[in-house]
Amino acid sequence: MDKEDYYKKEALGAPMVDFIGFRIQKRLGMFLRMQALIEGRDHSAVIRRMLTQQAIEEGYDPDGC
């Protein structure tokens, strides 16, 4: 899924009602923050996009249940 397509769909999708917090390595955190600056997004949006892309590869259907 294209980055811009993801962000458009996310804005129109189901509300965000679940929170999952987790620890990551400092280098990965810096990468995610830099990627967010590059994309002009909040780092949480970049994390959701990347996590969703990987979940799709594992069988997750973002439009299903």
Image (tube, rainbow, N blue to C red):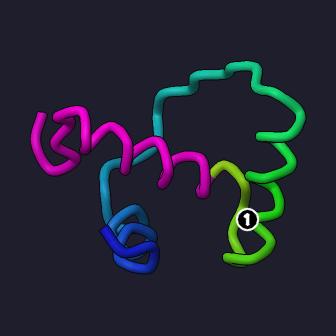
Considering only vertical position in the picture, is 61 above or below 13?
above
Query: Which residue is depicted at the point 67% across and 21% down?
Result: 21
Mark 1 is surrounded, within 10 Å at the Cα level, by few (under 14), some (14 to 19) or many (20 or more) other residues, namely some
Q: Find the residue positioned furthest to the front.
A: 27
Q: Is residue 38 above or below residue 53?
A: below
Marks counted in the figure total 1
Residue 23 lies, with reference to residue 38, above or below; the image says above
Image coordinates of residue 12 in percent, x first then y, are 33, 67
At 25% from the left and 42% from the top, the residue drawn is: 57
Residue 46 in magenta stretch: yes
Q: Going by the image, does 51 lie left or right of 65? A: right
Q: Which residue is denoted by mark 1 in the rendering?
A: 36
Chief secondary structure of the magenta span? Answer: helix
| Region rendered in magenta | 45-65
Q: Amino acid at mark 1?
A: Ala
Q: Is residue 7 magenta?
A: no
Q: Residue at x 12, y 33 (%)?
A: 65
- Please name the residue shown 72% across and 54% down the image: 43
Q: Is residue 57 above or below residue 13?
A: above
The percent coordinates of residue 36 (x first, y second) are 73, 65
Point out the residue furthest to the left here: 64
Q: Could you say whether the residue bearing mark 1 is in a helix, strand or loop?
A: helix
